[in-house]
């Protein structure tokens, strides 16, 4: 029986001086690409958080104004004159607080006989400059004095 010869090695051909693995340039390139991707994701996360904070501030400002309006309605028509409020710094619950992030003002005027117009403006403190006046929410409504027909 004749002897079979072994097949020649069909694996990769190695050249002298060629090393396996990645070179330093390839590694630095991969790290740079990874850094650019991570930087983009970080910027997206920061921008998303800022937008969420702004939306939360506007939502809170609207609720402060709504709560003030409901308090005015509960007060009664005859006592509305005492409800006028100059710019007052308040916290997120609407309670006066010199360190609060909101500034509320209430203006009441007579729109007609037995009809009062109430305007509540809530300004949002800028998180960077800590100043008021750049962004606000305004709520306007009317409160009527209903006449009792039995009187």
Image (tube, rainbow, N blue to C red):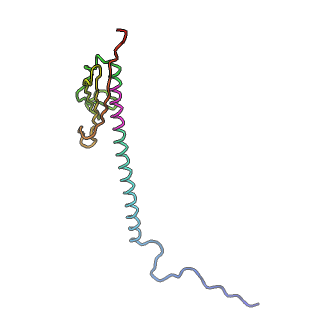
Where 139 falls versus 42 (above or below)?
A: above
Q: Quadrant of the N terminus?
A: bottom right
Which residues lie in the magenta part?
A: 58-69
Percent position of residue 133, x then y = 23, 38
Where 40 falls versus 97 (above or below)?
A: below
Q: Is residue 68 magenta?
A: yes
Q: Nearer the viewer, residue 56 or 22?
A: 56
Quadrant of the image occupied by residue 36:
bottom left
Quadrant of the image occupied by residue 100:
top left
Q: Quadrant of the C terminus?
A: top left
Q: Nearer the viewer, residue 16 or 52?
A: 52
Magenta: main secondary structure equals helix
Q: How many marks?
A: 0
Percent position of residue 90, x then y = 29, 30
Would residue 32 be found to the left or right of residue 82 on screen?
Answer: right
Percent position of residue 130, x then y = 24, 39
Q: Residue at x 26, y 30 (%)?
A: 89
Where 38 falls versus 72 (above or below)?
A: below
Q: Residue at x 26, y 27 (%)?
A: 106
Q: Residue at x 74, y 91 (%)?
A: 2
């Amino acid at each position: 029986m004749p002897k079979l010869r072994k097949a020649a090695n069909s694996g990769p051909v190695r050249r002298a001086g060629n090393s396996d693995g990645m070179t330093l340039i390839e590694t630095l390139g991969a790290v740079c690409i990874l850094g650019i991707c991570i930087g983009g994701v970080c910027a997206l996360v920061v921008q998303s958080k800022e937008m969420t904070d702004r939306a939360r501030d506007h939502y809170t400002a609207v609720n402060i104004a709504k709560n003030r309006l409901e308090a005015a309605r509960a007060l009664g028509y005859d006592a509305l004159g005492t409800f006028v409020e100059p710019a007052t710094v308040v916290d997120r619950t609407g309670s006066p607080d010199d360190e609060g992030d909101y500034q509320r003002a209430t203006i009441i005027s007579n729109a007609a006989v037995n009809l009062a117009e109430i305007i509540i403006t809530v300004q949002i403190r800028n998180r960077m400059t800590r100043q008021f006046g750049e962004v606000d929410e305004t709520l306007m409504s009317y409160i009527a004095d209903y006449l009792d027909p039995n009187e």
